[in-house]
Image (cartoon, rainbow, N blue to C red):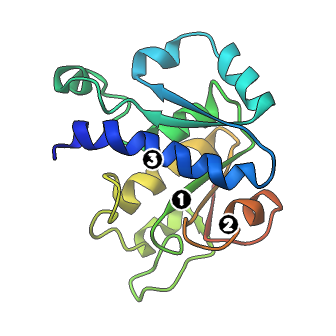
Amino acid sequence: LDKQVAAMFGQSELTHKWSEMFAQHAVPVAELLLTKKDLKKSAKPLRRAMEVGIPIINENDAVNNEELRRLVLLGDNDKLASRVARKPARADTLLILTDTPGGLDTEGNTIPVLDKKGREQVLFSGKSNVGSGGMESKVKAGFKAVKHGVRTIIANAHETDVIIKAARGENVGTRLTL
């Protein structure tokens, strides 16, 4: 299965799982697939959706390869998340979920707080088991958000209640700081 076809089928499954999870808290979930062009349009619909529930924002990977090549800004969901968090969402927090406990040092230990000077201590080898960006993409995208005042955390998607913990300000994963 090529990536575009996998994206077409996987997106509905992803949205369904998020809907089930947030239904336990009576929070509706919407799906929003974006391209670079969409980011230049009005932010009002996104902000209204955020007032109602949780918009699951994902890159529209189902578009053709030629369009993907033209969308230099994006290319992975880490960059997209950082871009949307800064503007149009104007988020106070960006939580980047991954399949590791956060940023790891060369010995495999989670780095609780990472500043730009400490980037050399992060283990950047390999890509995510499920994504395309890898830790380097997450860290780069995260620091862009931090630079614009967005609190940014990289944490394990499989940790119990990780979203709730992060929203409460509890220490999870790796918090990026300037």
- The single residue placed furthest to the bottom in the displayed view is 107
| Residue 161 makes an appearance in the image | yes
- The single residue placed furthest to the top in the displayed view is 41
Q: Quadrant of residue 128?
A: bottom left
Report the disc number at residue 97: 1
Relative vertical location of residue 104 with respect to residue 86 in this rendering, above or below: below
- Per the image, the residue denoted by label 3 is 13
Rendered residue at 60%/49% (across/down): 18
Rendered residue at 50%/86% (across/down): 109
Of the residues under marks 1 and 3, which one precedes in the sequence?
3
Relative vertical location of residue 7 with respect to residue 95 in this rendering, above or below: above
The answer to whether 173 appears left or right of 24 in the picture is left
Q: CA distance from mark 1 to mark 3?
A: 17 Å
Q: Amino acid at mark 3?
A: Glu
Q: CA distance from mark 2 to mark 1?
A: 9 Å
Mark 1 crowd level (few <14, some 14–19, many ≥20, 10 Å Cα) = many
Residues at circles 1 and 3 in contact by the CB criterion of under 8 Å: no
Element carrying mark 2? helix
Report the disc number at residue 162: 2
Residues at circles 2 and 1 in contact by the CB criterion of under 8 Å: yes
Horizontal and vertical percent position of residue 47: 72, 23
Quadrant where the image shows the C terminus: bottom right
Q: CA distance from mark 2 to mark 3?
A: 20 Å
Q: Quadrant of residue 76?
A: top left
